[in-house]
Image: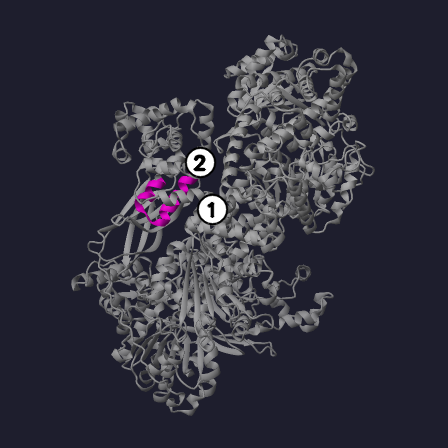
Amino acid sequence: MGYPASDANLHKVASLAQRLFKLQPADHGRSSVFERELNAGEDGVEFGADLIFQPPSRFLVDSLLDNDDLLEGPPSSRHDGWHDLDHGYSNSTYHHAVVDRRKLSLEWLSNACDRIVKECASQLSRDELAMAICRVLNSDKPGEEIAGDLLDLVGVSAFEAVQDLMLHRKELVDAIHQGLLMLKSDKTASNTQLRMPSYGTQVTVQTESERQIDKLRRKEEKRYKRGAENRVEDDLSATNFSSLLRASERRSPIEDLFGHGQGPNSLAVTALPQGTLRKHFKGYEEVIIPPTPTAPMKPGEKLIEIQELDGFAQAAFRGYKSLNRIQSQIFQTTYYTNENILVCAPTGAGKTNIAMIAILHEIGQHFRDGYLHKDEFKIVYVAPMKALAAEVTSAFSHRLSPLNMTVRELTGDMQLSKNELEETQMIVTTPEKWDVITRKSSDMSLSMLVKLLIIDEVHLLNDERGAVIEALVARTLRQVESTQTMIRIVGLSATLPSYLEVAQFLRVNPETGLFFFDSSYRPVPLAQQYIGISEHNFVARNALLNEICYNKVVDSLRQGHQAMVFVHSRKDTAKTAEKLVELSRMNEDLELFKNETHPQFSLIKKEVQKSRNKDLIGFFESGVGIHHAGMLRSDRGLTERLFSDGLIKVLVCTATLAWGVNLPAHTVVIKGTQLYDPKAGGWRDLGMLDVMQIFGRAGRPQFDKSGEGIIITSHDKLAYYLRLLTSQLPIESQFISSLKDNLNAEVALGTVTNVKEACLWLGYTYLSVRMKLNPLAYGIGWDEVMADPSLSSKQRALVTEAARALDKAKMIRFDEKSGNFSCTELGRIASHFYIQYSSVETYNEMLRPHMNDSEVIDMIANSSEFENIQVREEEQNELEMLARTSCPLEVKGGPSNKHGKISILIQLYISRGSIDSFSLVSDAAYISASLARIVRALFEICLRRGWCEMTSFMLEYCKAVDRQIWPHQHPLRQFDKDLSADILRKLEERGADLDRLQEMQEKDIGALIRYAPGGKLVKQYLGYFPWVQLSAAVSPITRTVLKVDLLITPDFVWKDRFHGAAQRWWILVEDSENDHIYHSELFMLTKRMSRGEPQKLSFTIPIFEPHPPQYFIRAVSDSWLQSEAFYTISFQNLQLPEARTSHTELLDLRPLPVTSLGNRTYESLYNFSHFNPIQTQTFHVLYHTDNNVLLGAPTGSGKTISAELAILHLFNTQPDMKVIYIAPLKAIVRERMNDWRKRLVSQLGKQMVEMTGDHTPDLMALMSADIIISTPEKWDGISRNWHSRSYVTKVGLMILDEIHLLGADRGPILEVIVSRMRYISSQTERSVRFIGLSTALANAGDLADWLGVGETGLFNFKPSVRPVPLEVHIQGYPGKYYCPRMNSMNKPAYAAICTHSPTKPVLIFVSSRRQTRLTALDLIQVTDQNLRHTLQFGIGLHHAGLNDKDRSLIEELFANNKIQALSKTLVLVCTSTLAWGVNLPAHLVIIKGTEYYDGKAKRYVDFPITDILQMMGRAGRPQYDQHGKAVILVHEPKKSFYKKFLYEPFPVESSLKEQLHDHINAEIVSGTICHKEDALHYLTWTYFFRRLVVNPAYYGLEDTAPEILSSYLSRLVQDTFEDLEDSGCIKMNDDGVEPLMLGSIASQYYLSYMTVSMFGSNIGPDTSLEVFLHILSGASEFDELPVRHNEENYNEALSKNVPYMVDNNRLDDPHVKANLLFQAHFSQLELPISDYVTDLKSVLDQSIRIIQAMIDICANSGWLSSTITCMHLLQMVMQGLWYDKDSSLWMLPCMSSDLVSSLGKKGISSVQQLLDLPKANIQTVLEGFPASRISQDLQHFPRVQVKLKVQKSDTDGGTFSLNIKLAKMNSNRKTSRAFAPRFPKIKDEAWWLVLGNPSNSELYAVKRVSFSDRLVTHMELPSTPTNIEGMKLILLSDCYLGFEQEYSIKEL
């Protein structure tokens, strides 16, 4: 206990303990076990040996232990004040002694002395005599001398008494020691009490006089103590006998408390094993523990043979016959179940194989269809030491190689790239490394794949690193619960007493998954010797240490064994080896060591002589070896080999050998247990882990019957090691010490968001398990335990305290009221870079925007990571010398100061200096290990704070540390492996910087460095040095925002050796005047990019008034020093757009009633009684005038109804005119159709048609329609030929919905059609009324001007006038990578739903279809168990890839809240298209991420602001909500941008300039443009022209003076014309332009001019099908086909399964993907993911018009064979079959391969032939296949009959024409719909009539016809009848294969 405690106190504690015991969960199994266990010990059988292994009786619990703990005080004090020797030794170690002890105590001695004094009339008193006898007995003299001394004392007459004394000397000495121990523990109590909290001590109130007496008493004690520490003899002399007697009678308080069980061996807790001896020598004491005999095999226990395993598992056990006993016992559970398991077994019991069995079980689960699915799983093996990790990696990769498994090491030394991680199935790592990886949400994908986590050496929990394991396990367990995925945990540990608690912590089921094996299961039993040296004098102690060590080694050698001596520093290995050799010389035992008799001695001796290590050679002579990590690998290997071959008998080594190399020896000596730890900054005790590992090396399994482990320590540590290694120290949690850091990591990861979750998380730690069992150790008083048995309030207090501290350090934001945490950038950086909380506090204090080099180094030196490093006297000289030689910077505080020392070592690391003294070497290694991450963290902190100077400064230092080169040294030093130091030194001396070298010639450089060949070399490496060129285009968006398009051009030679796979560059935009960074992003330059065209980045940056002179854009390499590029943005003559935003005020009018329409029918259209304020204010202009109107109002303010007012006005005034409604997205068109069909059409009796890609109405429908709803493209295509289409000119009202989309990618089309309609109206003099609807605009004036809207028609309301007010929350999330960032937003999204809209509908917008899936799944998992009942979630998905049925179902459910039955809330996760298309408002809108993956640019780009506004607009349901809420989760750097633009309207710019070519071409084809002047005139109608004048800089125009403007436009037109001419679309003559065939085709089929130009140059007279397919896929219409992240892997897989080759280097190219999709469609392959199905749809949809254009080009060129091949391609697309490979019979749904081959034998190979068969014959042909099925299928296909007749033309006699009659013969087939089940859209059948001559492949005419029943048509024959010979008419279908009919004209 460490201090005297009164009996009353002890009883009180005992009763409390009793109560606490009752509070524990009732586990009756435990208490009933006590007696059984206590009795088991007597017979000397291993406990449990006689039990058959059956649950639940197999775990015998050392329950007394817990109670022993309860009184023990905190673990730290255990060996300070605990009685210095264990109370157990003296009373229960020796069997026979205990019986006599009752009589033979100091009491007996006292009585004997009494008799002697009386009988012999001695001059001493009884007590004095007894004391004298005690001194004699306790001396170290031999027995005879002692007997003589005793006789001298008592006189000869008492001879029998002396005999008695001699006989029981041992017991008496023990009693004396026991008494001394008790006395000593009484004395040290006062000293110890200060060190540990004392529970249960009484508080007394003292008066002043008492205090004085107390003070005197303390002084006395101090003096007393000083003497007492000298020796036992002194102790005896100072003690009086009566107190010694009383003390020896007293037992240790714990024995008192628990009393004795039955029998002598009662006290099981601290009893040492049977047969333990204990010897005392001068200066030291030895405890010898005999080996535990190996337990015999139990009945029914058998070893598992390897043959019993599965085949693949046997491969991993090659060379093994069977498993050992332990492995066999755990085999069943490990190999056949998924249970978590914990195995506690002695070192050397083959735990590696247990791990292997678990791994094989996991592999077995992924072994399907005969091969291993390697991408489905990862296995993580956590090993505590790097050395061990390396050993495990090599062992496992060797053994798992037959299974083709990749095993890699991931530690501080061995980094893995992302690709390597993906390819690896098993990762061997250290706890810290795995913690870092799972802390980052960016690597979630990795931790999600982990299916098996093996934690080796779990007893590490007791170590200070134990907290890391706790954090890992807690994180894994939470992941298992939250994602409901299975991650199996396998814990491997040494034997430890508290295995039940550890099992509970690892969630191991104690009945099935917990295995405990004691030391009797060691493969080689271990004898142990513990030697405690009590000598105090340093020199004497060292001599004694060496001597004992030598004796033990010699004992072992005498028995013919080898010995290993473990020491704790590299220097010590040689010293100890020297000492051993020296002692052997002195004692003349050298022969024992030598090995010259070994047969190979002379051979090996030669090999040893070659080594450069002098020590190695010297010691080899004497048969001694040394081994440590500082030796060369070859020398280490040699030593290992010599030892295992027996050429070296004694090996002196450091502990790394025990971890890394499996080299056993019979005897293992640990010489001293103090080792230097730079982390603790001093000496610490050897941990239990190391001792166990080292002892594990004792005894060689094949050769020795037993091994011997000897530990030599100081006397005061003896008890500690004894308890540790006889596994009686319960392991405690170290978690509290690192609670802050771990809490921060969880908050940063997003798994803990409030106090409640934090408490739950703590519940998963070992701390929470131990805290309940041993509260005292964690500073929890009994009263607290009584009040709160589950300790939940204590947990809460711990969490709150940690959170407050983190909040103070700005690492998290902690809102005490709600208990919520939110992460900050600082906290995230600390978590990712593993920076301790205390360091962050230091940086907060010391980091400033301007610091010099030495201040920065000093700040790093102040990091708490280094706080324990000590300054030592002996290092001072060396440090001073190093400061002079290797430190270019000033050292603050000098070498004598701690931070000065660290600063010297940091500089030394960068300077690559060398160090001599051992402690400095280890300090330096420790510092360099942490340096890189600390500097990186500081860089990130400065970057986040936006400090220019410090950011670049810290980045330089990051690189300096990585490269170990100073920023001021020559940058070519980065090639120091290739360039000699001499060259580099000269370059530095001559001051030749890179720019200068770039300009110099080779020979000049050679001259400069005075070494001619060097010039070439330097020039070569200059080429490898990474440079980039920057250029930027800056366009102002508003007066405060600039858009920057940055072009990055790499300018160096890529060499994998230097540049790897990718180079990272930081792109920084900085304003040096205000020292601020406005934009930063990390740009990855890959090898492929470095060869290709420049890379373009776009971003926006703010600009402030007054303008700074310039901004700098810098590209700084992330890994190369001095590699950076600049670009200056000057604001000197930058013209900013004028700031004018005029908003219409919303007037306070009384809402108009519906009746003001003045028309009953119209009133019935609306189900409300009054118009809303906006409709009221615009009502008059819309309904009563013909003015053009531009209405800008926020989404959801009823603009559609405003548009309807204008329609109703047109119906009133001009009922014969048409309304055209243009909506930018198909989805909006569909919504309008559905809405108006229900109301306008049915109630007003009007006709309406839809024109989109999905629907093309026929001419009649268009003519008769009153309302046409169209997408811009469709209307553009139709109105291009407005001259010939009368309905285009009959438009009276044009409604442009969402006109602010002018700035988006499809804006140009919108712009063209409005300009064209205005142009048409000016030509036909019929006025067209324009109504533009948009969100609130910044530049409404320009739009109004362009639309011809006057003062009265312009309404531009503020964004704030929404009918339902909106509150917006913007939250930033960091994370460089997109997917992980999205992942980290899931929890906040869920939290937002809970906070803002727990019971109302929610919309979540994400960027891709894949994200809808992931987010929905994640939300379902996040749902808290407790909330399961209240929030039975209804979650829906919605994206363009769903089929219409599903889509409308979801929309309907959401709109009507039908999911009410299931839940209150409906959450709909959707892509951005929903925001536009479907009016489904919700109470809360969450925008999860504002970027999407742009397949073309191969990276993530931002959504247009308009989309974001549109999504936000969906928040707030006008009928139900008082206000709506929008939560926008964005990438942190963009937060300020969104804050700005979501509240002030965004200006709309034109993007026509980029797409001018196609539109000019169309106007040339339609005849609108014939001259250059026409083109200029045309441009003046556009919106582009309006904006060009207002914001010239945006369009790259300097000034708006008229002459500059006109030359700009003129040049634009000229360039456009020239491009079109080059591409073969138009022809330019003197002043005019005229269209060519390619141009007309481009306009007609709405294709890009690039596409037709590409067709023109690639299609030839007989192009093959394969080439056609390549040409088709190459069309620029497929540029936008998304190639999402990692899809190149799917494409690669597809490319192996399709017939035609694709370019394998461009698998991420959209055109290659299109090609693969086509081929997969024809081959009917299964597509890898659902996204591909929707991609295929859009590809097929686009392809029809592209193929038709190709057919036209072929036909116009008169190429018959190409035309027909191309028609076949179209048939293939329609049917999804190969024309040349597949039989057309496959078009029948019921076809099978057997049927095809059987029909083939009968000569039937096409559907056409089947159709021609008479019904009766069909059955006979089919042979048993039901004819009804076939006939049913055949009804889908038409039978066409052709009748031909040649006639002379009436007009001029020379020509003939061909009359053609077509008729369909199936009378019962009513439809002319094409039967094409594999084509996604409905299509009508059409036919080509091709007139040509197959013999010379000429084509004369093509006609495309479609008919329902019959058709008569004619074709002109060519006028020259010469080639009538081979002329044929061919009829081809455009959708069926094999329906060709050929007719020869000659025969007619």
Front: mark 1 or 2: 2
Q: Pointer 1: residues within 10 angstroms few (<14), some, or many (20+)?
A: many
Question: Which residues make up the magenta segment?
Answer: 930-955
- Relative height, residue 1222 to residue 335 (above, below): below
Can you name the residue that lies furthest to the right here?
Answer: 299
Picture coordinates of residue 1907 (x, y %)? Answer: 51, 76
Between residue 726 and residue 1466, name the one nearer to us.
Answer: 726
Magenta region, main secondary structure: helix
Residue of label 1: 831
Front residue (pair 280, 1555): 280
For marks 1 and 2 on the same chain, the one whose residue lies earlier in the sequence: 1
Q: Quadrant of residue 1721?
A: bottom right
Taking the magenta stretch, the answer to whether it contains residue 771 is no
Could you say which disc has been placed on residue 867 in the image? 2
Give the x, y percent position of residue 255.
70, 36
Q: Is residue 776 above or below residue 1233?
A: above
